[in-house]
Image (cartoon, coloured by chain):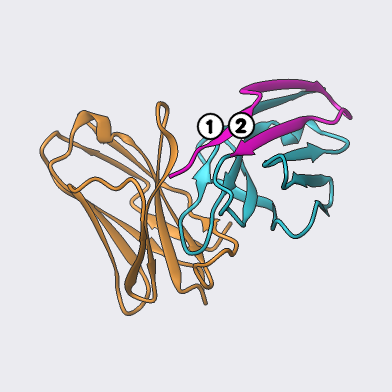
Amino acid sequence: QQQVKQSPQSLIVQKGGIPIINCAYENTAFDYFPWYQQFPGKGPALLIAIRPDVSEKKEGRFTISFNKSAKQFSLHIMDSQPGDSATYFCAASWGADGLTFGKGTHLIIQP
Amino acid sequence: DSGVTQTPKHLITATGQRVTLRCSPRSGDLSVYWYQQSLDQGLQFLIQYYNGEERAKGNILERFSAQQFPDLHSELNLSSLELGDSALYFCASSVSGTRDEQYFGPGTRLTVT
């Protein structure tokens, strides 16, 4: 499976700030890009997903920006709250294949 | 709660043994995926089934196998277990199994001693 590179590995942001997590991929066949949130001891929870025919998608406080030519996509969390503290994973897939995940970003939102 | 159920929640076993993990997908979902999460490898796709048939394979070891039954539940069989197989095993389900939302279960934590 092709790699998905995620950065930063960890991130600390003050409450109300906008954490930004970036991912880059290699396989141009990827056509589905979801983001997952995982709390300790729980399964990953789907946050938001985008397909390459759009450059931005917003759901509540979460926004994905997608740059097809650069093969990059990012997650922005608006008005971040301490309850958003979790590990975030970007992922990519194509066709019927399973998801290829980034290594994760451990996000801490300080009160 | 995603609607995906997995049993057991925890499993402790010895090297060389065989275990079976079980997953029930969300109501209406035909596709089941299995993933392994470990500290060194991260989240890795193992295998996908759609409506009882194997559809895609990832980094699944030959010692591991899976199947999906007519009622759509799935089982992941892990045999000749090694210490390195200790990990969280997640099942996910989706409606069509192609470029659609995958919903993850709570996982089974496997410890091999």
Question: Does the magenta-highlighted stretch encompass residue A3?
Answer: yes
Q: Chain of mark 1?
A: A
Give the total number of marks visible in the rendering. Answer: 2
Image quarter where the C terminus of chain A lies is top right
- Corner quadrant of residue B95: bottom right
User: Residue B104's spot in the image, x, y percent?
Assistant: 51, 54
Q: Which residue is at the front of the view, B109 or B43? A: B43
Q: Amino acid at mark 1?
A: Lys
Q: Residue sitting at 50 percent across and 38 percent down?
A: A3
The 10 Å Cα crowd at callout 2, few under 14, some 14 to 19, many 20 or more, is: many
Shade of chain A as shown in the rendered figure? cyan
Shade of chain B as shown in the rendered figure? orange
User: Residue B93's spot in the image, x, y percent?
Assistant: 48, 63
> Which residue, given by chain and number where applicable, does mark 2 sit on?
A6
| Number of the label disc, if any, that sits on residue A16 | none
Q: Secondary structure at mark 1?
A: loop
Q: Residue sitting at 46 percent across and 74 percent down?
A: B30
User: Residue A85's spot in the image, x, y percent?
Assistant: 70, 31
Distance between the Cα atoms at labels 2 and 1?
Answer: 6 Å
| Number of the label disc, if any, that sits on residue A103 | 1
Image quarter where the N terminus of chain A lies is top left
The 10 Å Cα crowd at callout 1, few under 14, some 14 to 19, many 20 or more, is: many
Report the magenta residues as a range: A1-25
Question: Would residue A27 appear left or right of B58 to someone viewing this image?
Answer: right
Earlier sequence position, callout 2 versus callout 1: 2
Q: Secondary structure at mark 2?
A: strand
Q: Which residue is at the front of the view, A19 or B71? A: A19
Q: Residue sitting at 79 percent across and 22 percent down?
A: A13
